[in-house]
Amino acid sequence: MGRVTPLEFRIDDLSGEQTRALVAHHLVGMHASSPAESVFALDVEALREPAVTFWSGWLGDDLVVIGALKVLDRTSGELKSMRVTDAHLGTGAGRAILRHIVGEAAARGMSTLWLETGSTDDFWPARRLYSSEGFVECGPFADYPENPFSIFMTRSLEH
């Protein structure tokens, strides 16, 4: 599959069938790669919390990617629930939504972004993407415990 370029990003209320199915697929994948107590992915209801903005990326009528920004405090946020549909893996869709969320966080005046991702080999492509976009490994943040199945990363935002 070729590169995804003209994605349309929409703030999504998680009511659509395609979006809900991709969130469910994401959760199944997280539980397949990590023990239950080490899965910090949010379900549909948690993604609807007021502190979370959830986006979906579309190519026409096809859902390609999802991702969310959770406000931690006035100056920092957390990336949550980034997932590309299987049909669009390797097309640049993950990078596109990551850059979209980073841009939205900066536009909101945030100075720092954080994320938690898995430490197993299944998560290597995600960690490589985050590193290539300026995220560096750090210790646990917010309420996350130290966890052998988690890698924590952060990035400063320039205004």
Image (tube, rainbow, N blue to C red):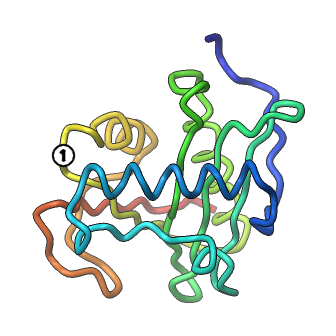
Quadrant showing the N terminus: top right
Q: Position of residue 37 (x, y in %)?
A: 23, 74
| Closer to us: 91 or 128 | 91
Image position of 48 with respect to 125: above or below: below
Look at 42% across and 54% down and name the residue there: 28
Side (left or right) of 124 relative to 17? left
Quadrant showing the C terminus: bottom right
* Residue at the spot of label 1: 120
Look at 39% across and 49% down and name the residue there: 29
Q: Residue furthest right?
A: 60
Q: Position of residue 152 (x, y in %)?
A: 27, 63
Image position of 121 with respect to 78: above or below: above
Image position of 57 with respect to 47: above or below: above
Look at 57% across and 75% down and name the residue there: 70
Q: Secondary structure at mark 1?
A: loop
Side (left or right) of 20 relative to 34? right
Q: Residue furthest top?
A: 2
Residue type at mark 1: give it.
Thr
Splitting the image into 4 quarters, where does residue 63 fall?
top right
Q: Residue furthest left?
A: 148
